[in-house]
Amino acid sequence: MNLDQFTANWNYPTNIRQGLGRIRELTAVCQELKLRAPLLVTDPGLSQMSIVTNSVEDCRKAGLNCGIFSGITSNPTAQNVTDGVTALKRGQHDSVIAFGGGSALDAGKAIALMVGQTRPLWDFEDVADNWKRVNVESMVPVVAVPTTSGTGSEVGRASVILDQEHHRKRIIFHPKMLPTVVILDAELTVELPPNLTAATGMDALSHALEAYCAPFYHPMAEGIAVEAMRLIKMYLPRAFLNGNDLEARAQVMVASTMGATAFQRGLGGMHALAHPLGATYNSHHGLLNAILMPYILSANRSAIEQPIKRLARTLDLPNPGFESFFEWVLSLRSQLGIPHTLSEIGINADRAQELGAMAFNDPAAQGNPISFTAAQYTDIFIASVQGTET
């Protein structure tokens, strides 16, 4: 056995306050962190909802100069980040409350990073040691409040930002992008409609599954990934069927945070394809991962059959093995109303070779169990459009 493979550097998450109703602690959290003027970053839809307006009002009643910025698209862009930085500086804010789904969390963290930088955003893309270029002293702290259960961006050290000029998503990374405090309050998710409950929940599953299958040594992440998938199996269908099932909502929210914690071990082909597809077609990231899941599983089968068998046993699937796990994924997608092919959401194979090349070059591809070529990613993409196995 080569013991060198057991050498690794590990970083695990932040201060998390989990429980129903804990959004009411937001003001106290800001005061404990000595934040005087937070900028609440959210999306346009949430900005008018009571869960946001009440939080802003509570902060202001406590004497905090709390502003609000909602100029964010569903796939946040560099311009969204620039506009957010302008709003933060104009209001003389000293921190960010990133409040919402993955778009708001990613945008909020990027705004907090960029507020004092002199270099452009793309100079901090997660390539080589670009993160060392960051002027850390100029960053401002982030309090993260997720309102969906999928991305897990609240425990991430990166933001996924759309490069509109080149039609691709880029990962902006720095270790200190990790929020200082996270509030996990499942009551904030009860208004999430069933289709978004399904898509975000499947995104959480994709994180845990790809982390579990990644070919790197990180047993803590592997264990967390397994428990995240067990919780999703038990509770996501319940949350989908009854949005007011607070136990199910809370368990899926925790599973989402766990999945994002686990993918420090790596992601894989699902995300390698979902990133360029989202950038090209402006499609929902979680939905893309959900559709791609069985096609990536099938393509990776030769490398993951044994770990998937162990996983199937843990999930208490009948006749545990790759086939039973694969059938469970198909069944879960059907239960949640997830389309079986990309063509069902308006994506065709016209740009297959281009998208295959983009997937090959995506950073997530490094964690795939098999090092697929661009041509192989093209084939997987075509299969997911047509509904055929690779």
Image (cartoon, rainbow, N blue to C red):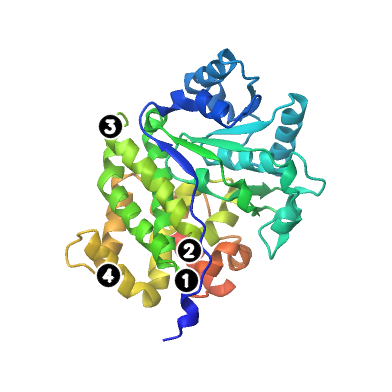
213 in relation to 168, above or below:
below
Mark 1 or mark 3, which has the lower sequence index? 1
**Residue in the picture at 44% in, 45% down:** 150
Q: Quadrant of residue 238?
A: top left
Residue 245's disc is: 3
| Nearer to us in this view, 25 or 305 | 25
Which dot, 4 or 1, sits closer to the camera?
A: 1
Residue 309's disc is: 4
- Secondary structure under badge 4? helix
Q: Is residue 237 left or right of residue 171?
A: left
* Residue 267 in view here: no
The residue to which callout 2 is attached is 265
Measured from the top left, where is residue 45 in percent x and y? Answer: 54, 26
Name the amino acid, label 3.
Asp
Q: Is residue 317 left or right of residue 210?
A: left
Q: CA distance from mark 4 to mark 1?
A: 18 Å
62 in relation to 253, above or below:
above
Q: CA distance from mark 1 to mark 3?
A: 36 Å
**Residue in the picture at 58% in, 30% down:** 42
